[in-house]
Image (tube, helix red, strand yellow):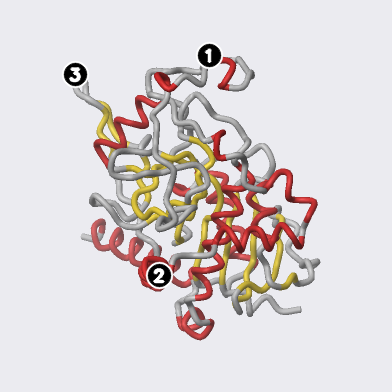
Amino acid sequence: MSFAPYTVGWICAITTEYVAAQAFLDEKHETPTYLSPQNKNDYTLGRLANHNVVIAVLPIGEYGTSSAARVAETMLHSFPNVRIGLMVGIGGGAPSADHDIRLGDIVVSTPSNNHGGVFQYDYGKTIQGQRFFPTGYLDQPPALLRAAVNGLQAQYEIEGHHLADDIDQVLERNPRLRRKYGRPDPASDRLYQSHIVHRPNNKSDCTVTCGDDPSTLLLRNPRTEDEDNPMVHYGLVASANQLMKDACIRDKLTIEKDVLCFEMEAAGLMNHFPCLVIRGICDYSDSHKNKAWQGYAAMAAAAYTKDLLCRISPPHVQAERKIMEILSTGKLIILFTLVKLISP
């Protein structure tokens, strides 16, 4: 069996995301059996929207930018024909007056606020007597993916979308997934005011611990029939080697950078595995985290990804340069520049 046809590389961080990705495949292919002994990744191969896709998941218990980078690098060595990359899964939302982000919504990384789509908020410098200054710039997603995002955004604006129906169809075909991956009761989507903090190490439900009083919540009107639900948001994804559970820091970065979402892997990929980041929103990046919405959020992100791939023709993907070639060219340019700098 040749790995040459696999042109789309899809990275997942956790099992929930990996299950959702596989559930949306139109066809599953045989698992590879002859990988190098040094290859520690777990792969699922298949066809999605006429594209041959290879999906990999991070090792259980490992999170963050470095682990994501290792998995992507190993994937590219085993599947050197991969031409476009996707990082698909769940993340924490950053709702604001400008962005009505709710649980189950989708955030897509797009260039914003002088960033390429992903902002690494824990990388920078601290100067005495001054605030922390983030530094560095991460690459933006490839043009082919950004064009497809724009096209799909226009399609949704005109026609709406059928993501909720697509998820329901997947769950009908896979009834074992309904309990964990179905849409939770909308009443469980509670956005607490930033000063309301869930007590550390208290695993009780927020309705018991933090209350369900309107004075503790930011109340939002139900979405109308004219509004998409889930809604898709486009903008900046904040990434770092830490789990965001602080509503005050969330709000600060939302004001300063117009961040829409927080996650832990994308910053390790953008300069080494050029990709589009797609996140289903499972919490609000605060102390009130729970796992109730993780399954549905992962399904929403996977459903959007399938719609996106439907807008891209396989010949257009095949015409893209292999990611391995792009990275190799970049390394040669850097090496040539260094040689010129140190040469007499």
- Percent coordinates x, y for residue 12 in the rendering: 60, 52
- Percent coordinates x, y for residue 145 in the rendering: 42, 69
As helix, strand or loop, the secondary structure at mark 1 comes to loop
Give, as a three-letter code, the residue at label 3: Gly
The disc placed on residue 199 is: 1
Residue 121 is left or right of residue 276, and the answer is left
Q: Badge 3 is on which residue?
A: 129
Give, as a three-letter code, the residue at label 1: Arg
The disc placed on residue 329 is: 2
Q: Is residue 283 above or below residue 270?
A: above
Q: Nearer the viewer, mark 2 or mark 3?
A: 3
Residue located farthest toward the bottom when viewing the structure as drawn: 315
As helix, strand or loop, the secondary structure at mark 2 comes to helix
Reading the chain from its start, which is encountered first: label 3 or label 1? 3
Q: Which of the pair 264/253 is nearer the observer? A: 253
How many residues crowd around disc 2 within 10 Å: few (fewer than 14), some, or many (20 or more)? Answer: few
- Residue lying at 46% horizontally and 82% vertically, measured from the top left: 316
Query: Mark 2–mark 1 contact, CB under 8 Å?
Result: no
